[in-house]
Amino acid sequence: MLAFMKEQKMTAQIYKTDCLPEKEQKKELFIRHLGEILKEKRTEAVLTAMDIHNFKLVNEIWGMRNGSRLLSIIVDQSLKVLGRGESISRFFKDRFYLLMLGPVNAIKERLESMRQQIEAEFVRCIGYPYSLVVSLGLCEYNEDMESGDDWLIRANYALESAERPVGDGFAVYDNAMRKNLQEVRKIEKRMQFGIENNEFRIYLQPQFELATGRLSGAEALVRWINPEAGPISCPDQFIPLFEKNGFIRKLDFYMMEQACRVLSVWKKQALEPVPIAVNISRRHIGEPGLADRLLEICKVNSVPPEYIEIELTETFELSENETLMKALSALKKAGFSLALDDFGKENTSISLLREACFDVIKFDRSFLAGCIEDERARNLLDSMLKMVKNLGIKTHVEGIECREEEALLKKYQCDRVQGFYYAKPMPADMLTNYLPKT
């Protein structure tokens, strides 16, 4: 790769950032170049964030050597479409950035040609047909951008949109994305204040034994509410953001503390407690000492761990990750029960049910969709429930909305249910109405 050279002495600039001793310096050079473009107010300038979808799979299938060749092909083909005053940088892994000059539509044509050549060259390299998915997020110059970092953030945001399953792999930063990014920044600025000032509230949705109708537990759900302004943001917005920026770790421990406090209050009120299900993010489920940390929260609040059910979403690749499997074993050993949440919503490995020590499998509502009218859907649900029960695991179906669905699940001998048909999520103190006195 070439070292940094002044624009007039080169055709295209390359900033190689994967050499660790020089990584920050090279990154700063590229960002400085972006800043210079902003100062010059080059209105026809476009920053593109480029990513190879599932690059890890390329390495696993074709080997690390061919993975490295692919990265070289990307650089070579990028240089063929870059001209004077344009540049390319790789900050990490398979994430590239290209600064290009000209109208955005013309640049899209150049990038599409480059994308086709990258795939063609890689196929020639490995000698087999292979479909590469190269996603591109474009952001045009805008006078309201304050720095090169700001430009990078917007290009990355466009790339996230380009990586969605629908579309052609291109996305150009627009007003809708700008509005969403402003909302993201507003949330991130307030999230620490929110947790320090108890703006995150625990809501509980009751869970019932289907055969008896008895309250069997409750799921802890988070709501972000300011006492004066009302709801700050809905979980569908802030949870994915917190997963991405790492704040979910603080929120998970916060919700664990809130659940234990609720259980402690019930005990003081001489109410018969039921277990509370608390979600733990995949972002930190495998971190060392997690079980001990959760157990300590229980001890501080004088709550036996058997009153906490740890929920994990099925997006975990647990059967392929020894660290995570050990984490589950540690949680189980500490006395917590384990539930696999949203079963059926994503692609679940059946071997996961055999290898992991789950006590409960929570079926997503999608399994119920169409069951009333469609015999095949009913047969599938019946078969899946039987399979899980035959493994000695309790079955739990979420999202029950009507009497017909309840009757169907009774017929299939489902163990537990929850949904709006029974009760909506409610403030924790309202659930006391469901609890008998000890």
Image (cartoon, rainbow, N blue to C red):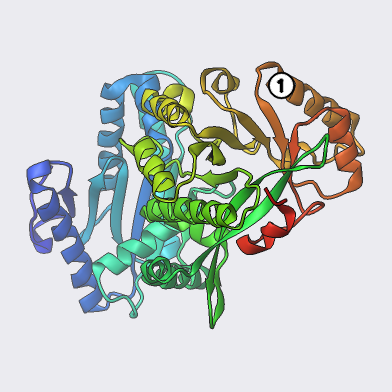
Question: Camera-side residue: 87 or 194?
Answer: 194
Above or below 48: residue 361: above
Which image quadrant: the N terminus? top left
Residue linked to disc 1 = 389
Residue at 45% over, 40% down: 282
Residue 92, position as x, y percentages in the image:
25, 44
Taking 29 as reference, is 48 left or right? right
Q: In which quarter of the image is residue 407?
A: top right
Residue at 89% over, 29% down: 411
Residue 106, position as x, y percentages in the image:
42, 60
Name the element at disc 1.
Answer: helix
Residue 60, position as x, y percentages in the image:
37, 22
Count of labels in the image: 1
Above or below 181: residue 360: above
Q: In which quarter of the image is residue 274?
A: top right
Residue at 25% over, 40% down: 76
Residue 62, position as x, y percentages in the image:
36, 20
Judge the density around disc 1: few (<14), some (14-19), many (≥20) Cα neighbours within 10 Å: some
Tag 1: residue type?
A: Lys
Question: Camera-side residue: 389 or 109?
Answer: 389
In this orientation, does residue 276 appear?
yes
Taking 366 as reference, is 342 left or right? left
Taking the view exactly as shown, the residue that stands out farthest to the bottom is: 228
Question: Camera-side residue: 50 or 156?
Answer: 156
Residue at 52% over, 18% down: 355
